[in-house]
Image: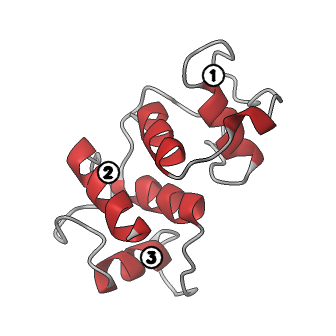
Amino acid sequence: NRAEFLKILLEASGRDLSVNRNRSGFSDVDEQAWYAPYVRYARFNGIIEGYSDGTFRPDQAINYAEGLKIIYFTLQVPTADVAGAWYERYLRHALANDVLFDTAVAMDQPVPRQDTVWMLWRLIE
């Protein structure tokens, strides 16, 4: 899910989560939940924006489009601005650099844990 995805990325990238004590600002984030420090850090550092209704949806499965954007923002991997869907810049970079475990994925499909680890490893490498 989206909360677990954030935790994996932020822990793997060695981020200091203690630097932000602000509230997440998302109406559906329990500020006492295990995932709250990750959400607060990601929000404060521009890694996530949430949905237009003011939610983060921590228990919702993360799809490939969202996952790619979050990984690229977390690791600060530069991408070229390209025409197309909002996620196109991340997808093009991922395809060109073997970041995706399976290149035939649909961007609206959930990201399995194995693919999360694969994408993270490929971009950290």
Q: Classify residue 61 by image quadrant.
A: top left
Please say if 8 is above or below 24: below
**Residue 33's spot in the image, x, y percent?**
58, 15
Q: Classify residue 44 by image quadrant.
A: top right
View extreme (right): residue: 22
Instruction: Bin the neighbour count of mark 3 within 10 Å (Cα to Cα): few under 14, some 14-19, many 20 and up.
Output: some
Residue located 81% across and 28% down the image: 21
Q: Amino acid at mark 1?
A: Val
Callout 3 touching callout 2 (CB < 8 Å): no
**Residue 64's spot in the image, x, y percent?**
35, 56
View extreme (top): residue: 32
- The quadrant in which the C terminus is found is bottom left
Q: Secondary structure at mark 1?
A: loop
Q: Secondary structure at mark 2?
A: helix
**Residue 22's spot in the image, x, y percent?**
83, 30
Q: Circle 3 sits on which residue?
A: 88
Q: Secondary structure at mark 3?
A: helix
Q: Classify residue 98 by image quadrant.
A: bottom left
Q: Circle 2 sits on which residue?
A: 116
